[in-house]
Amino acid sequence: MRSVDAGLARLRASSGAPVDDPRLIGVKLDLTDPASIPAAARAIEAAVGAPDVVVHNAGVAAFAGVEETPDQVWEQLFATNLFGPVALTKALLPAMRTRGRGRIVAISSAGAIRGMPGISAYSASKGAIERWAEALSQEIAPFGLGVTILVTGTFNTDILTEQTPDYGDHNGPYASLYQGIHSTGKAAVSKASPPARFARALAAALEDEAPIARRTVGADAAALAFMARLLPGWLVHQIIRVAMRIPRKGALHTGSQGLVTVQASGAPAGGAGRKIDFVDQVVIVSGAGRGLGRLYALEFARRGAAVVVNDLGGSMHGEGADAGVADQVVEEIRREGGRAVASHDSVASPEGGEAIVRRAVEEFGRLDAVVSNAGIFGSVDFEMLTAEEWRRMLNVHLDGSFFLSQPAFRVMKSQGYGRFVFTSSSAGMFGQPQEAHYAAAKAGVVGLSNVIAIEGEACGIKANCVLPFGHSRMVTETVGGDDAAAQFPFLQLIDPKFVVPMVVFLASRTCELTHHNYSTGAGRYARVFVGLGEGWLAAPGSEPTAEDIAGNLDEVSATQPFTVPSSIVDEVMQISLRRGLGQGGAPGNEAETRFTAETRLAAILDDPKAKAVMAKHYPEIANAGPLLRMGRGLTLRQISAFPQAKMPPERLQTIVDDLQKL
């Protein structure tokens, strides 16, 4: 309920119970507050006497490896998941013993069957409550009382939808392990059972008469219990490792100089990092029949991916079709022992994009990465550019990227993982004569990628752009044929094979970057970004004129210092802060009360104890994504005003109350 008053109101609304319904009684309880528990027990006994059933359902979780889970997080989880339920039970048992009947229901988890990686503190607390419940059952059975343990799987409840706080260092030694756990975890969340199923199982448990009963609820919990009961421990370990995409023993061994020594087959010992592979992954490459796209497809296949080779087989100007272009690349991959299928659909229509994605899912069962590479080219002076030429160029490059990425995004979201690599161009970022239509399309691709990066962040989806230089068909047709390299030395430097490493990296699980653009060619790899200068700020209350702009043009046009906003909202927030909005309460308030509703989020996140309070009452903060990046300069009250923040007034007040105790 989080809040008794708000929770009861929701409960009455959903059940149709009137305000004065005596069956619904609200009792305030904080399992981490020693004073709250006896007060709650007294309120319960005053209302109903000895309870028939006590269900210990309250719980919190946290994600991180054992080494990176803070001590205070262990204390918080055990306080809520174990010590609180024990204390409440002790307070209620005297009345229940006197009555001579009653039941204690402990809600456990699949993590208690076998400790699960990444949630060691949660697994340990749930395992502990099971052992406690088993011991308790022996002690209270002679008084006519019993215990039921409900071992639950994954259900679509707040512990998932509010997102478990993540304390792991995703750039540290456990980074690759976390990637696998997160991708499989998000896929499991997408298939989580509805809460109603859990409620029905709980209702059935209330009818138990045996001194102790143990029930598993959910297919995943039942499967794990079955394996743990029948299979040897080492085999269960291997099954969990493979299912959660955890590297095998020794794969992340660190050498004496701190470099990861990869022990995987075919990987070099030493080197600059672990080998990037695409084993058990599926990649779509559009425009993969020739040029750069063909090189991408071949490299993905060599690294273990199943590849959908998409190419309509048209000319560089978007005319005609030839199915054999894609088929030849598929045959080339298969001759080398790889897996691939051809797709001859055009990206330039919604039906074509859907068909390409459907081909991947039907053939290989999933989709991990999409490289939008298909394109056409043509040069024409701006004043001579026709509407037909304009529309055809945007249709293939911009519309095609959208038509392919939208159905792919839906598949990736359901999996909880995905990578997009869009092909933009320096022509779109910086301009190029005779390429107005091409430049506009490629600039549009950057905008599309930016939004997919923002919306996909919470779903494990990353989106980036590559701006390639490669001596491919597009270049040769522009400068005059395959023999042009002899006349233009630079063409000898921009071998298209030098573009491939960046595309492979951006499409891989190793890549945690998103919302970025990279220029790639001739062995040079560099980020391309749009920066925002600090600019000139008009005086408060003034009405700037064109003459003011002219008079302050140096400041208006300065490129130093600059920032790189993460979105348009980020830019607005920067302006707001410079204008004094969100600066907190009146001077001196912070000295009297360290944390208030007017405290900026940055001040809270920079204080470990305050950050722990936020993690406890507002677990969304761990994965707030764009809101977190944009909101550090805002006050708690301002953040609570955002609908997507999901911070109603009573929740804000709870956070402030606990912050003021520090």
Image (tube, grey):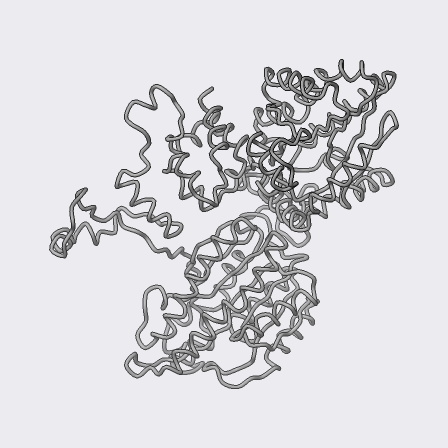
Extreme residue in the bottom direction? 320
Quarter of the rendering containing residue 332: bottom right
Q: Position of residue 15 (x, y in %)?
A: 66, 40
Q: Is residue 188 above or below residue 86?
A: below
- Which residue is rendered at x = 56% and y = 50% of the image? 460
Q: Position of residue 560 (x, y in %)?
A: 25, 48
Q: Position of residue 166 (x, y in %)?
A: 56, 37
Q: Is residue 138 above or below residue 312?
A: above
Between residue 431 and residue 620, name the one nearer to us: 620
Asked whether, in this view, residue 465 is left or right of residue 548, the answer is right
- Which residue is rendered at x = 67% and y = 69% of the image? 340
Q: Is residue 384 above or below residue 41?
A: below
Between residue 321 and residue 74, name the one nearer to us: 74
Between residue 73 and residue 572, name the one nearer to us: 572
- Which residue is rendered at x = 40% and y = 72% of the image? 491
- Which residue is rendered at x = 51% and y = 28% of the image? 612
Q: Position of residue 660 (x, y in %)?
A: 44, 22
